[in-house]
Image (spheres, helix red, strand yellow):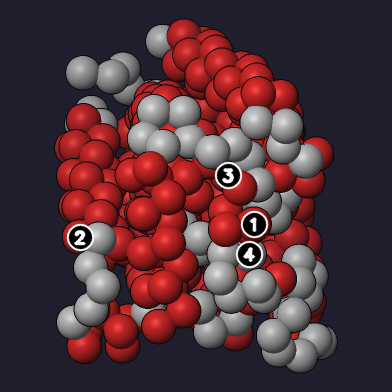
Amino acid sequence: MTTKGAAALAAVIATWVVYALLSGWWFDSSLRGVAPYVYAPVLIVVGGVGGWGLGRASPRVAGVVTVALATLFLVGVLSSGAPAKGPIGYANANAAVAVQLIALSGLVAMRSRAGRWAWPALAISVLTVVANRSAAAMAVAAPLVATVALAARFSPGRRRWPAAGLAVATLAATAVGLVALARRVVWPTIALEAFDEVRQLLWLQAWGAFRDAEVAGRGPGFFEALNLLKDPDQSSAHSLPLQVAVELGGIGLALLILLYLAGLGVAVNAATPARSWIAVAAWTALAVHSFVDHLLEYWPIPLAAGLVLGYGLVAQPDAEPQDEVI
């Protein structure tokens, strides 16, 4: 089952990459515009392979690697100033990686002999999210931390499907909210307080451009040329679905949905039900965060997401029996 899920994810990624390349060729897009659509999904696979290897290593090795990664990101943000905080150079991207490291720490903690390394790594990752002051990352990190804590304290038994159901419902609700805001010229006060006027303009521009080319979009990199702000920090739509809608159209959105569902299938089929809940929460956290920010062009993020998926598949439990999907 897990092999089939991984194969499905790889097939969707391959289709995505081929479509992005064809779109870039058709619209004569720049290499800079096409590149993120190619390397981001490929790095999910690379991270998955790395996670697979880490999962087959000893608990101590996995624990030490997790602590090292978490420490790297905390030191990076504390040793650099805003807005270009290290180690990635963008606070929200740093925080997005830290969220995935929270999940990886939780997965490692499921192996009892690695707990003394995993829990400090989780705490460091939480501190990294806070230090980056990313409101979106904090919002998605909170339920992820709760999921890790509950998985560690209470076994979910054999049930995995509620995690997948909650994940799909969360994404659907987020998508409805995003579309509702993107279509509005005037935002309610609560939305402006949660986001800002810059996103209001970016999302409105993106929605209008999508409606003008709903099927195939305008090609990779188009939104940057369209953007009225002409600011490098705001050259994207700050929303992955809206960026894809503008540049790859409805076809791209359909592939994006399939990509999420394929990754969700891998997460659901983690080594044990407890790991499944953590992996699903991490994958969904990244998806929700990407609705309101530009993330995946920062290569450590898809790499970290793949690491969580791959580790969850093969990590051998020390104290929890493996169960089959029902």
Q: Which of marks 4 and 1 is in front?
A: 1
- Name the residue tied to disc 2: 180
- Name the residue tied to disc 4: 235
Name which quarter of the figure residue 31 lies in: top right
Residue 182: x, y in percent? 30, 62
- Name the residue tied to disc 3: 305
Amino acid type assigned to the residue bearing label 2 in the image: Ala
Residue 83: x, y in percent? 69, 85
- From the image, which quarter does the N terminus lie in? top left
Amino acid type assigned to the residue bearing label 3 in the image: Ala
Q: Nearer the viewer, mark 3 or mark 1?
A: 1
Q: Distance between the residues labelled 2 and 4?
A: 22 Å
Q: Nearer the viewer, mark 3 or mark 4?
A: 4
Q: Distance between the residues labelled 1 and 2?
A: 25 Å
Closer to the camera in the image, 53 or 74 = 74
Q: What element carries label 4?
A: loop
Name which quarter of the figure residue 24 lies in: top right
Residue 209: x, y in percent? 42, 50
Amino acid type assigned to the residue bearing label 4 in the image: Ser
